[in-house]
Image (tube, rainbow, N blue to C red):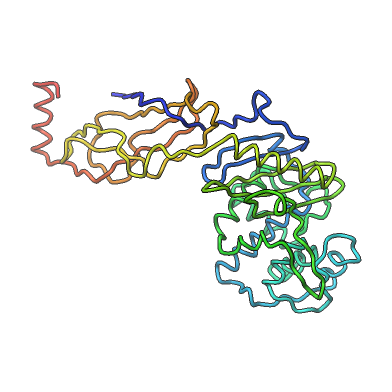
Amino acid sequence: MKQNLRLMTLGISLLAFATSAHAFETKAQNAILMDYETGTYLFTKNHQVMIAPASMSKLMTVYILLHKIKEGEISLEDTFTVSQKAWEKGGAASGGSTMFLKIGQEVKVEDLLRGILIQSGNDACITVAENIAGSEDEFAELMNETAEKLGLENAHFENSTGLPHPEHKISAEDLAKLARHIIKEFPEYYKIFSEKEFTYNGIKQGNRNPLLYTLNGADGLKTGHTNEAGYCLTASAVRGNRRLIEVVAGLESNKERSEESESLMTWGFASFDNYKFFNKNQIMANVPVWYGALPNVDLVVPEDVIVTVKKSTKNKYGAKIDYDTPVKAPIFKGDKLGELKITYGEKILQTIPLVAKEDIAKVNTVSRFIANLKYFILGK
């Protein structure tokens, strides 16, 4: 028998509210604002369109480098050699952003990491790519393989830098997802993203991320600019126990990028909040068990249920649970036996599994016979 039990009205939501009713508007051609903890999209605009990402591409180069450091394949103290290609294509003569490396120079990985994140050095990216994969082309293949593993469905890389290439594209959505992976997987290195200056070869350069200087709580990630991409930014900020991630692209000036990114982030913190409304292992239902050593099994949520809420509409949301009853033994702890559904009116916003709290063994043949007899006589 199917049970559909309405629980209670809850102040919760997972909708991307800002995409409706013009709750927020931006001059950016492409944009997304994401809650880091829940993954909820608070605002989207052309967020799945593949665009030229310019230097925001370097987030994938950094992800691969940090992954190899974390796995012990590379050390921060290791040195990489600067090739002529890295110097020519990414150096000062190229006209792009550079770390001002020299041909044949041996550079510590830690310095290259800062050269990419703070100085946006194209020469640093190419040096990393060549020393990890043998060539930048082979590194681009590694970037695409990594994108697939991370579930980035609208991403294709042709180089390590983001320098213009007709097939080098990624969506704002995938950049936000990539930023979330970096923050989550490499917390011990993420602090480098917020450093405001770095000096190498006697040349001091400042971090290009404008929010580091103007927005309370901003702590990374990466700017970008080419003629095709316009002015772009992938950024994150923390206030209290909340973190937001945003991507804006296709803006017309550095000033516009600063203003639009700060406005979107400020609006996100002001308009939304996160609520924990069920705790890990909280009992949601007690379900009869057929042929079980125990007559009932508790259904629990396997993790804390935290939901992003639009403050102005928090009273419109609810939850319900669905499960089949009775459940046939044997049952093992963690078996999915039902679902918790977060709702907005009739719309289901999120589905969370309900699992068995404990093992319940199957009774022997005699006990099953008695159970069948009781059901035949008493209907139980």
The answer to whether 103 appears left or right of 248 in the picture is right
Q: Residue 30: horizontal and vertical position, in percent? A: 74, 38
Q: Residue at x 71, y 71 (%)?
A: 111
| Count of marks placed on residues | 0
Query: Where is the N terminus found, in terms of image quarters?
Result: top left
The answer to whether 260 appears left or right of 19 in the picture is right
Q: Residue 246: horizontal and vertical position, in percent? A: 66, 44
Q: Residue at x 25, y 32 (%)?
A: 287
Of residues 265 and 317, the one nearer the viewer is: 265
Q: Residue 237: horizontal and vertical position, in percent? A: 62, 49
Query: Where is the C terminus found, in terms of image quarters?
Result: top left
- The answer to which quarter of the image holds residue 171 is top right
Figure check: 59 above or below 110: above
Of residues 138 and 76, the one nearer the viewer is: 76
Q: Residue at x 76, y 67 (%)?
A: 124
Figure check: 287 above or below 193: above
Figure check: 167 above or below 123: above
The answer to whether 121 appears left or right of 187 in the picture is right
The answer to whether 241 appears left or right of 48 in the picture is left
